[in-house]
Image: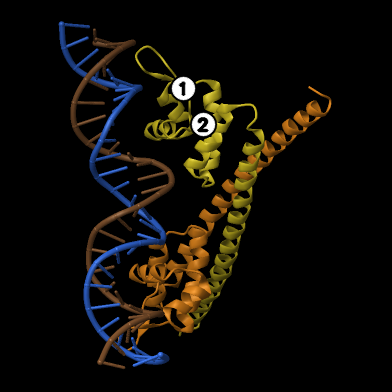
Chain colours: A orange, B yellow, C brown, D blue
Amino acid sequence: MKISEVSKKYDISIDTLRYYEKEGLLPNITKNASGVRDYSETDCARIEFIKCMRSAGMPVERLSKYISLCVQGEGTEEERRNMLIKQRDELLEKRDAIQRSIDKLEYKIDIYYNILLDKEKAFRSGN
Amino acid sequence: MKISEVSKKYDISIDTLRYYEKEGLLPNITKNASGVRDYSETDCARIEFIKCMRSAGMPVERLSKYISLCVQGEGTEEERRNMLIKQRDELLEKRDAIQRSIDKLEYKIDIYYNILLDKEKAFRSGN
DNA sequence: TCTTGACATAGAGCTAACTCAAGGTTATAT
DNA sequence: ATATAACCTTGAGTTAGCTCTATGTCAAGA
């Protein structure tokens, strides 16, 4: 798969794909004789994973570290697992912070609803 | 309340408090004759709100816009409400993206668990 | 053959949200 | 009286994560 196809498929800009590669998130991409990238199935799976993690705010540097462990292979499983656990725990906290924010917003939205309703009533009764 | 107290109470750096003020998030802070800030109850309530919104990633610029509407007062309620609704909807999406990421992480953590368990077994049986 | 379009690299530029540094003033403790 | 600490302002510096620019190569169609 060529870079433009991957870009379309995953809705990630070509620049970003090359940037990720430079940062170590996409190691060992095959290139043909004239240097053109050809993304494999494995590369695509990795891109999907990266996209998911990035959408949740996992830092590029941490992803890079994790992927370098994957490439190292055998013997790094425990460290990899610990990284994922840490990341998950951070996301749980983040999710809760977002939920608190949502709750506060809902509360205020409701208050404005009542204010606007009162104004409407006042208008109708000719104030 | 002085800036250092506010800083401690809300765990926001002094620099950040002044930065927020400059960006319009904390308008009309009272200052004494020698220019020292004195945060009121209202200011503190606003800081708490800002902290909550910032922790969920609401942009400073949007907060600034919202707060300027609050300061404008009467007649801006509908626009304010719409801003909050938009922000809430974005957070709902964000929360869901994070949840998807959490789910993927849980899945992988479990896979690593089984890998490590198998290694342990192999070790015990002398492989 | 010539042009066009998709690819490549290297490195500069951009934005958000802080964070720090330099230099100055004021209130308080010794 | 002086030193210290807490405040002030202005403006520069930092970081992450892209995004853009300049320049060049290469394969395919008119």
Chain bearing tag 1 is B
Q: Horizontally, is A11 left or right of B80 in the view?
A: left
Task: Find residue D8 and report its horizontal and vertical position in percent.
Answer: 34, 23
Amino acid, disc 1 = Ile
Chain bearing tag 2 is B
Quarter of the image for residue B102 reads bottom right
Is residue A21 placed above or below B10 in the rendered structure? below
Q: For this rendering, which residue is in front, A66 or A109?
A: A109
| Residue at the image position 47 percent from the left and 73 percent from the top | A7
Q: Label 2 to label 1, Cα distance in Å?
A: 12 Å
Q: Residue tagged by mark 2? A: B47
Task: Find residue B103 and report its horizontal and vertical position in percent.
Answer: 60, 65
| Residue at the image position 57 percent from the left and 54 percent from the top | A92
Q: Residue tagged by mark 1? A: B29
Amino acid, disc 2 = Ile
Q: For this rendering, which residue is in front, C26 or D10?
A: D10
Q: Horizontally, is B58 left or right of A2 in the view?
A: right
| Residue at the image position 77 percent from the left and 33 percent from the top | A117
Task: Find residue C9 and report its horizontal and vertical position in percent.
Answer: 26, 74
Answer yes or no: is residue B116 visible. no
Assess disc 1: are there few (<14), some (14-19) or many (≥20) residues with their C-alpha within 10 Å of its C-alpha.
Answer: few
Foreground: disc 2 or disc 1: 1
**Quadrant placement of the C terminus of chain A:** top right
Assess disc 2: are there few (<14), some (14-19) or many (≥20) residues with their C-alpha within 10 Å of its C-alpha.
Answer: many
Is residue C20 placed above or below A7 in the rendered structure? above
Both on one chain, marks 2 and 1? Answer: yes
Answer yes or no: is residue B103 visible. yes
Q: For this rendering, which residue is in front, B100 or C30?
A: B100
> Along the polypeptide, which appears first: circle 2 or circle 1?
1
| Residue at the image position 81 percent from the left and 24 percent from the top | A126
Q: Secondary structure at mark 2?
A: helix
Is residue A95 placed above or below B22 in the rendered structure? below
